[in-house]
Image (cartoon, rainbow, N blue to C red):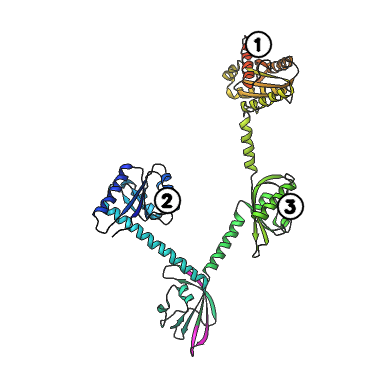
Amino acid sequence: METIPIKVLLIEDNSDHAQLVQEMLAEAEANDSDLLSFEFLHCERLEQAQETLARGSLDVILLDLLLAQNNGLDNLRWVMETAPGTPVVTLSNKANEALALQSVQSGAQDYLVKGEMNRHLLIRSIRYAIKHQELWMKLQSSESRFQTIIEKHADGIVIAGMDNRVRFVNPAAESILDRSAEDFLDKPFYIPLANNKKAEIEILRKDGEVRVTEMTVVATEWHMEQVHLVWLRDITDRRRVEERMRLATRVFENTAEGIFIADAQANTILVNKAFTEITGYTQEEVIGQSIHLFHSDHRDSKFFEQMLESLSITKQWQGEIWNRRKDGEIYPEWLTISTVLGELGEVVNYVAVFTDISTRKQTEDRLRYLATHDPLTNLPNRELLLDRLNHVLARCIRNQQLAGVMLLDLDNFKTINDTFGHSHGDLVLQAVSARLVGCLRKSDTVARLAGDEFTFILEDISKPEDCAIVAQKILAAVTNPYLLDGSECNLTASIGISVYPKDGESVDILMKTADIAMYRAKENRNRYEFYTPQ
């Protein structure tokens, strides 16, 4: 008799143990009497197993909890999500048996301990896992069918005589009480209410679930007999909805995000506490007002036309927008607007959720600034300098202009650091930077490259001598005394100058020739030198 093989996937990065498992399965096929047959698959990593898992054709998965790349329970969750419905048996060593127990609590059907496992334990565990999964799937299906009955037959009827013995139970009552009619017929039924009374009672079902039921008792006649008609309405779901509504209200009022709800005409009908805190408006001031009240002038009409188009087509819009607080301050926010539709597909409401991103924007702006500027002096750094120099040279080529590049190095700046300390040295660098900026035109650039070294770009000069004039101003500015702890200290500088296009036509060559000239100037200090070939 031909048997359908049980398809087993082993996810195990230890090849020796994988070989052992395969041999156990082969041994079971050869020796067990119930015609076992296995199709064995092996993957060393989760990534290799992904395609096999996704096909969903496996009967059982053996998962090593000690795979090197991830946490064992994370591996289990990933496998269960990738191959839902496939039973999993986890593998662990003795030292990690607690983890294996946790895996069963997390959804695995069983676990095996390496070193203690034999073919009998392996086969028993595989069979148990498959059977357990089948029973679980049947239970899930049964619960789904039972839920459908509850939804379609929400009201139940129990008819009991004046002796409280049950005469009739309809299918809805069977569902609500979780018992068959045979469990009730001609047996006493507890009725906690007098006739013509209504109350909410809790019913404990056989499965342990507590359902909230609205019970109404009336006296009537049935088959020529005076009886109690007990009307049961399961209101558990309604109570849960009410609780969710109460929860939603608490979330609405306590969330950090601002929320406002508008009608189809975009007039505000409800706002939460965070809205008033962010915007400064009270509820009374905004209810009935158009949402356009909060708009700033940062966006043109086309922007809002595109927003309305998105709401019309996708029923949602999300993005960054600038709005206005009550005090007039303009601030950035991340806004999500969703459209609520009625039964006929018409727009009923707009729900907007927003977050004030002022702090985030400030942080982003600061990070962008620090990416291109020296944090000590606030001067451009090397990256921004080179970018500007590239643009200057491009303009020089187009307009056939000259440009100058100057490198400045402070003479003996190390002495100030050694004498007064680095914190005072930083103060001197800040003072020097301010003086250097004061020597330049707005179109020029000075950048701090590193330590006590600065670089200048002089754009649109008419002749090389223009660089000399600026260099003289800089030397004079640098040599003015600096006051540190009540004492004066003096500095000088050495400047090297290169001129485009005479001394170079690229950024690298101009920087190199200016550097050569600067080192020549440092031989005598407190002077500038134009680049000249050796």
* Residue receiving disc 1: 532
Residue 490, numbered label: none
Q: Which residues are magenta?
A: 210-228
Front tag of 2 and 3: 2
Dot placed on the residue nearer the N-terminal end, 2 or 3? 2
Looking at the rendered structure, the secondary structure element under dot 2 is helix
**Dominant secondary-structure state across the stretch colored magenta:** strand
Front tag of 2 and 1: 2
Q: Pointer 2 and pointer 3: residues touching (CB < 8 Å)?
A: no
Left or right: residue 464 versus residue 9 is right
* Near-viewer residue (294 or 348): 348
Residue 292, numbered label: 3
Dot placed on the residue nearer the N-terminal end, 2 or 1? 2
Quarter the C terminus occupies: top right
Picture mark count:
3
- The question of residue 217 being in magenta is answered with yes
Dot 3: few (<14), some (14–19), or many (≥20) neighbours within 10 Å? few
Q: CA distance from mark 2 to mark 1?
A: 72 Å
Question: At which x and y percent is residue 86?
Answer: 40, 55
Residue 330 seen anywhere in this rendered image of the structure: yes
Looking at the rendered structure, the secondary structure element under dot 1 is loop
Question: At which x and y percent is residue 297?
Answer: 75, 45
Dot placed on the residue nearer the N-terminal end, 1 or 3? 3
Q: CA distance from mark 1 to mark 3?
A: 66 Å
